[in-house]
Amino acid sequence: MDLNKKNVIKILLIITFAIALFLALENISSVLSFIGIVFKIFSPIILGACLAFILNVIMTFIETKIFSPLNKKNFKLWNRLRRPLSIILTLIIVLGILVILLLLIIPEINNSLITLVQNLPTYMKDLNNTLIDLLEKFDINAENMQFLKIDWEKFSKDIINFLKSEGSSIISTTVNVTTAVFNSVVNFVLSLAFSLYILASKEKLSVQFKKLLYTFVNSNFADKCCKILKVSNMTFSRFLIGQCTEALILGICCYIGMLIFSMPYAAMISALVGATALIPMFGAFIGTAIGAFLILLINPAQAFWFIVFIIILQQIEGNFIYPRVVGKTIGLPGIWVLASVTIGGSIAGALGMLISVPLCSILYTLLKEYVNSKQSVKK
């Protein structure tokens, strides 16, 4: 290697990067703390960008498909009104879906909690009798098992006394929770406002970003960045559309099946199963667990058959619906879908499960293109 000015700069940059990486690893706790502070400061902007990306999928569909006849006429007034109307319709659709889900889920959960509280003494007595019968079968004297003799009136009084004695701490905790909720609401409002601004001027922001990119970096690197962003946008958009379609199909199938088998809470549980199915692979099982618990309060036998029904439905969905609706749209083999969901869930929980599949699809697409280009060069 010739030690010209260009190569010396590259060597110095590599040495600087190595030293910075070593210092960062040596002080990893401080680095993570700093990253956490930065993320907290910029969280409304980051959340706003994520909201804008999700809403943009719906808004683009409205602009290009629903308003297609008006777009062809090319009226000046319409060209000005198209974007605001598309944003308003997008917000109405999203809010409408959320309101419908809340109206279906919250009242039924409230009724289930009331049923649980009313029937709790009966449940505990039945459990107590079952344990006594079980002990008698094994020739164990139930009188020696003191935990079976619970004075529920004393138990409830102890709870009331605890609440009275710990009232100040409970109030303090309530204040802290209220403050946290208020801060979250403020951050969400700021994020929503930021996302609406992005949607209203996304073309202008795209042009500005490209100008900055091509100004500060060389053309080859800028072209690669634009290509990666284009692939990312296409993959995430397809994944979002496919995942929502798959969740809707699963929710409808669950609702029809529950009606056929006369299971309670059909609308609420189906909506919950469909909503949690947005998490790839494992999401529907979360809704299944909640639904089975609610049915268990009314009819334990039906709860068992509900679990069997969902397992069968999940097999149909996983083998026929998901590969056709989601798998083909993102172009990712099933084994990598499972691997990405597992790794993403272990790193960031439900959010990791949600974003790991499109991220893995992007890496898979870029790596495939890179390998194919290298193979074609060798040939």
Image: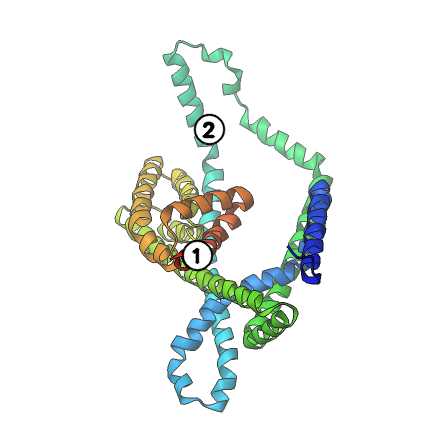
Q: Position of residue 311 (x, y in %)?
A: 33, 41
- Mark 1 in CB contact with mark 2 (< 8 angstroms): no
Seen from the viewer's position, the closer of residues 266 and 162 is 266
Question: Who is closer to the viewer here, 338 or 269?
Answer: 338
Residue 124 shows which numbered tag?
A: 2
Give the mark toward the camera: 1 or 2. 1
Question: Residue 302: x percent and y percent?
Answer: 32, 39
Residue lying farthest left? 260
Q: Which mark is residue 119?
A: none
Is 373 situated above or below 134? below
Callout 1: helix, strand or loop?
A: helix
The answer for how far apart the CA atoms under marks 1 and 2 are is: 68 Å
Where 263 falls versus 126 (above or below)?
below
Quadrant of the image occupied by residue 244:
bottom left
**Quarter of the figure with the N terminus:** bottom right
Q: Answer left or right for 188 relative to 275.
A: right
Answer above or below: position of 129 versus 300.
above
Identify residue for label 1: 374
- Identify residue type, mark 2: Met
Q: Position of residue 84 (x, y in %)?
A: 52, 78
Residue 219, image x and y in percent? Answer: 58, 70
Q: Nearer the viewer, residue 106 or 245?
A: 245
Residue at 34 percent of width and 57 percent of height: 328
Q: Which secondary structure, mark 2?
A: helix
Q: Nearer the viewer, residue 348 or 340?
A: 340
- The answer to whether residue 52 shows anywhere in this view is no
Which circle's residue, 1 or 2, is located before the other in the chain? 2
* Quadrant (top left, top right, bottom left, bottom right) of the C terminus: bottom left
Amino acid type, residue under disc 1 in the picture: Lys
Residue at 66% from the left image edge and 48% from the top image edge: 177
Q: Residues within 10 Å of mark 2 (few under 14, many from 20)?
A: some
